[in-house]
Image (cartoon, rainbow, N blue to C red):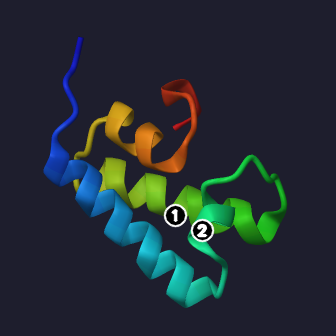
Amino acid sequence: MKTTNITDIDEVEKMVQVAETICNIPANTIKSNSRRMEVLAPRMAVSNIARLERGIHYNAIAEVLCKDRCSI
């Protein structure tokens, strides 16, 4: 089982804060189960940047976004 790195979790949290500022959506809404496009797009951007650009493991991203790792 892959352990989550605390610095990875902090980095994803910072990405959520940036998305919150840019999109003017509260962080708890980005982490919610909403499927509205204005919430889905920032969540998708955070997860894609974290995974593809930063190489952060699915488990850390899923933990921050309150999703199942298979959804990332």
Identify the amino acid type marked 2.
Pro
Q: SS of the residue at dot 2?
A: helix
Location of residue 13 by image quarter: bottom left
Q: What residue is drawn where x is 43% and y is 80%?
A: 18
- The residue lying toward the viewer, choosing from 48 and 1, is 1
| Residue that badge 1 annotates | 45
Please tell me the numbered disc located at residue 72. Answer: none
Residue most toward the right?
Answer: 36
Circle 2 residues within 10 Å: few <14, some 14–19, many ≥20: many
Identify the amino acid type marked 1.
Ala
Q: Is residue 1 left or right of residue 72?
A: left
Residue 44 in the image: x percent, y percent?
Answer: 57, 56
Q: What residue is drawn where x is 62% and y is 84%?
A: 23
Residue 41 in the image: x percent, y percent?
Answer: 66, 65
Q: Is residue 70 left or right of residue 25?
A: left
Image quarter (top left, top right, bottom left or bottom right) of the N terminus: top left
Evaluate if marks 2 and 1 touch, with contact meaning CB atoms under 8 Å apart.
yes
Please tell me the numbered disc located at residue 42. Answer: 2
Residue 24 in the image: x percent, y percent?
Answer: 64, 87
Q: What residue is drawn where x is 56% and y is 28%?
A: 68
Marks 2/1: CA–CA distance: 5 Å
- The residue lying toward the viewer, choosing from 44 and 26, is 26
Location of residue 25 by image quarter: bottom right
Q: What residue is drawn where x is 55% and y is 42%?
A: 66
- The residue lying toward the viewer, choosing from 2 and 50, is 2
Q: SS of the residue at dot 1?
A: helix
Residue 69 in the image: x percent, y percent?
Answer: 48, 28
Count of all numbered marks drawn on residues in the image: 2
